[in-house]
Amino acid sequence: MPVKSKAIAIQKDQGQARRLLTALFGAMALALALVLAQATASDAQTRPTTFADLAEQVSPSVVNITTSTVVAGRTGPQGIVPEGSPFEDFFNDLDRGPGDGARRSSALGSGFVISADGFIVTNNHVIEGADEILIEFFSGEELPAELVGTDPNTDIAVLKVDATDLPFVEFGDSNGPGSRVGDWVMAMGNPLGQGFSVSAGIVSARNRALSGTYDDYIQTDAAINRGNSGGPLFNMDGEVIGVNTAILSPNGGSIGIGFAMSSAVVTNVVDQLKEFGETRRGWLGVRIQDVTPDMVDAIEGLDLARGALVTDVPAGPAEDAGMLSGDVILNFDGVEIEDTRELVRIVGNSPVGKEVPVEVLRDGTMEPLTVVLGRRETSEAVAFPASSDEPENPQEADLLGLTLSEITPELSEQYSLNLDEGLVITGINPDSEAASKGLLEGDVITEAGQQSVASIADLEERITAATEGGRKSILLLVRRGGDPRFVALVLEE
């Protein structure tokens, strides 16, 4: 074949190849576009276009609650919630005709049925102090209710009506995939006494603490107003993941910051109230405080500010297990402990009498312990015994910016002390770190370097040991009015 003819053939083949490649890339681009379009459409389908089906499904299980209380010898308004309570915003108190120095006060709230035989969950503050409790169902039927049990610590109450075959809802997992920050939720209740009402929003935040020991609130922007208290917060599967309890508001109305006690807390409380009529929480038997960053260097073997620092161990489960003041609880029942709030919640949710493995950091070494939990409701008030023996030959010294003295009868009377051993702070350098940490005259130092101190010589020995050990600070256990706390002070160079 002539050279010119071969060149023309090659050019034709190259042109066909380019056209084939162009067609191939075009097909691939079209396929990719279709996949992206389908994914976008799928995402759009996961967003609720309406809450109507969900509302229709769960509405029959939501109830309105009206309480009635006879108030004698009072002239001012009397609500179910104590004056100044953060939960006052949930009530629409109606005063009905004073007469003869007594009157009947009514309040409105919400609740939901959790079993076909008539168990109902609401807030404690909805029914607290009520003489009569009336339940209005979605159908319009009304039934009187009896109080089964209540838990002021979590503001949860369980009621019972005499009925069968009631529509009910179940609890969901407030820590599950449908309860993440950003997930859709729906609140139901009786806002402002207007009757059954629905509002929707998202989970705004989780694990919120307001003021309670066992707080674990879900924060939501779903509208919650007076009368919604005690009503359910649903996930998109129609499961209750929270009980609407509180709002943050400058004017008493919803501004999109509402709080629902998580089902992780509520389910355990409800089970105990149904079984015993009261709560029976686990009790470890220690006083604790958070580990702060300035304490880390003073606690041998601790790398981060974590765990719960034991300040006192009275007679009880922890003492029986060998736990000591100064131990740092880092693991409880297989759970790594970040702070005291987490430990208190886990212990409280544990069964009374359970044998629990606990790991504590002591003198730089992890110590395994086994604690048999007691019951908080009956054991928490265990007293700390104090001896009346008087020390001899008291001494006084200036250390760490403090003027310290061994305990004398005169100092015990002056500062109302109930301790027989330790060092009393009788003066503080106002420019010292001790002053900035909030130490006061009359405080008593009972431990230094996680060892007891009964004399000035003891404290000097602990300071010397810490300095020689290369530590920059020393941990002091300070008692004020019987309440202990640890304070870390920088050692003088």
Image (spheres, rainbow, N blue to C red):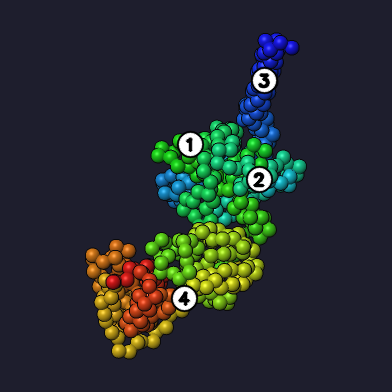
Question: Which is nearer the N-term, disc 3 or disc 4?
Answer: 3
CA separation, marks 3 and 1?
56 Å
Tell which tag, 4 or 2, sits nearer the viewer.
2
Amino acid type, callout 2: Gly
- Element at label 1: loop
Amino acid type, callout 3: Leu
Where does the image place residue 466, in percent across and percent down from the top left?
A: 38, 75
Q: Contact, CB < 8 Å: mark 1 with mark 4?
A: no
Tell me the number on the disc at residue 172.
2
Question: Which is nearer the N-term, disc 1 or disc 4?
Answer: 1
Would you name the residue on which mark 4 appears? 384
In this picture, residue 355 sits left or right of residue 454: right
Give the position of the N terminus as an image quadrant. Answer: top right
- Element at label 2: loop
Give the position of the C terminus as an image quadrant. Answer: bottom left
Q: Residues within 10 Å of mark 2 (few under 14, many from 20)?
A: many
Would you name the residue on which mark 1 appears? 256
Residue at image x 42%, y 65%?
A: 296
Residue 231 against residue 318 in the figure, above or below? above
CA separation, marks 3 and 4?
86 Å
Question: Which is nearer the N-term, disc 1 or disc 2?
Answer: 2
- Element at label 4: loop
Tell which tag, 3 or 4, sits nearer the viewer.
3
Tell me the number on the disc at residue 21.
3
Tell me the number on the disc at residue 4.
none
CA separation, marks 1 and 2?
23 Å
Q: Residues within 10 Å of mark 4 (few under 14, many from 20)?
A: few
In this picture, residue 458 sits left or right of residue 426: right
Q: Residues within 10 Å of mark 1 (few under 14, many from 20)?
A: some
